[in-house]
Image (tube, grey):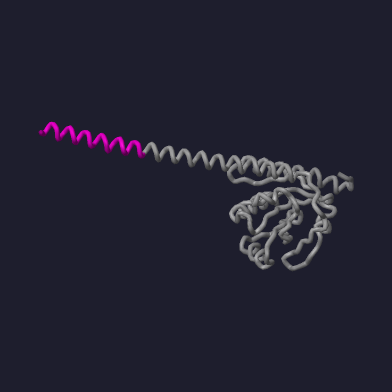
């Protein structure tokens, strides 16, 4: 009787152990499945953004787009960007807020080698007061202009993510880039390249030679 009881006890322990092992295996599979799904979503998002970035490269933007400063002064894009080269940061109030704030940090890096006046922010807010509040809260020292919900007409605006690019008086986009905190190496390359290209192209304007 004692031997039978011990046998039952050992069997019960083995059963519980196997159930725990199966549960652990199932949890592991679920975890791997979730990781694979997240990786796939990340990959799909990266490929999508890459195509949007490439589509936006070299596009001519409508110079008649109206910009409104925080003071309520209006001007066209062509009037603002006429005979100089600018680094443009484009975002919307609907974009990822944390991403926008991270990008402001990149602008602060660029201002060490580029004049603040040649770094501008083009954003879209339904209410100008919301733009003013965001600028004050985040201590933004760059010129900021509000544009309509129709934006600049760039494919990159469909991403829902902030992005950077260069633009001169021709209003043609150059070096469109989505800064990505998940891939800081690529962003660092961009931040190192932009000042060099900026100085090279700016020297053309200084010498009054056409691009």
Viewer-side residue, 83 vs 38 = 38
**Count of numbered circles on the image:** 0
Give the quadrant of the C terminus: top right
- Height in image: 92 above or below 71? above
**Which residue shows up at 21% across the image and 34% down it?**
10
- Residue 67 appears at what percent x and percent y? 77, 61
Provide the residue span drawn in magenta.
1-23
Q: Quadrant of the N terminus?
A: top left
Residue closest to the eye, 163 or 28 = 28
Q: Is residue 100 left or right of residue 36?
A: right
How far across and how far down the image is residue 72, in percent? 75, 68
Corner quadrant of residue 28: top left
Residue 83 point in image, percent of width and height: 85, 53
* Residue 153 forms part of the magenta stretch: no
Taking the image as shown, residue 115 lies to the left or right of residue 206, namely left
Q: Looking at the picture, does residue 39 appear above or below residue 125? A: above
Give coordinates of residue 158: x percent, y percent: 68, 50
Residue at point 61%, 55% (across, down): 101
Farthest-out residue, left: 1
Q: Please name whichever residue, 92 or 8, is drawn nearer the observer in this view of the structure.
A: 8
Quadrant hosting residue 137: bottom right
* Residue in the image at 63% along x and 55% along y: 95
Q: Residue at x 82, y 58 (%)?
A: 64
Does residue 7 appear left or right of residue 73 in this picture?
left
Q: Does residue 4 show up magenta in the picture?
A: yes
When the figure is inspected, residue 35 is found, relative to residue 117, above or below; the finding is above
Left or right: residue 46 versus residue 58 is left
Q: Name above or below for residue 165 compared with residue 12.
A: below
Q: Main secondary structure of the magenta part?
A: helix
């Amino acid at each position: 009787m004692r031997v039978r009881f011990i046998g039952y006890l050992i069997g019960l322990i083995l059963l519980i152990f196997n159930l725990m092992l199966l549960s652990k295996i199932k949890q592991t599979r679920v975890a791997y499945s979730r990781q694979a799904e997240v990786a796939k979503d990340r990959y799909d998002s990266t490929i999508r953004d890459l195509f949007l970035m490439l589509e936006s490269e070299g596009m001519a933007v409508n110079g008649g787009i109206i910009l409104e400063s925080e003071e309520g002064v209006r001007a066209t894009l062509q009037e603002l960007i006429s005979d100089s080269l600018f680094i443009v940061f484009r975002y919307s109030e609907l974009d990822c807020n944390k991403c926008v704030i991270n990008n402001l940090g990149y602008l602060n890096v660029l201002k060490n080698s580029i004049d603040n006046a040649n770094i501008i922010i083009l954003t879209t807010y339904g209410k100008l007061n919301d733009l003013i509040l965001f600028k004050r809260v985040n201590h933004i020292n760059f010129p900021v202009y509000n544009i309509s919900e129709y934006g600049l007409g760039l494919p990159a605006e469909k991403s829902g993510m902030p992005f950077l690019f260069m633009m001169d008086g021709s209003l043609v986009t150059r070096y469109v880039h989505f800064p990505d905190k998940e891939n800081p190496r690529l962003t660092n390359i961009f931040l190192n390249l932009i000042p060099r290209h900026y100085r090279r192209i700016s020297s053309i304007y200084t010498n009054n030679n056409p691009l």
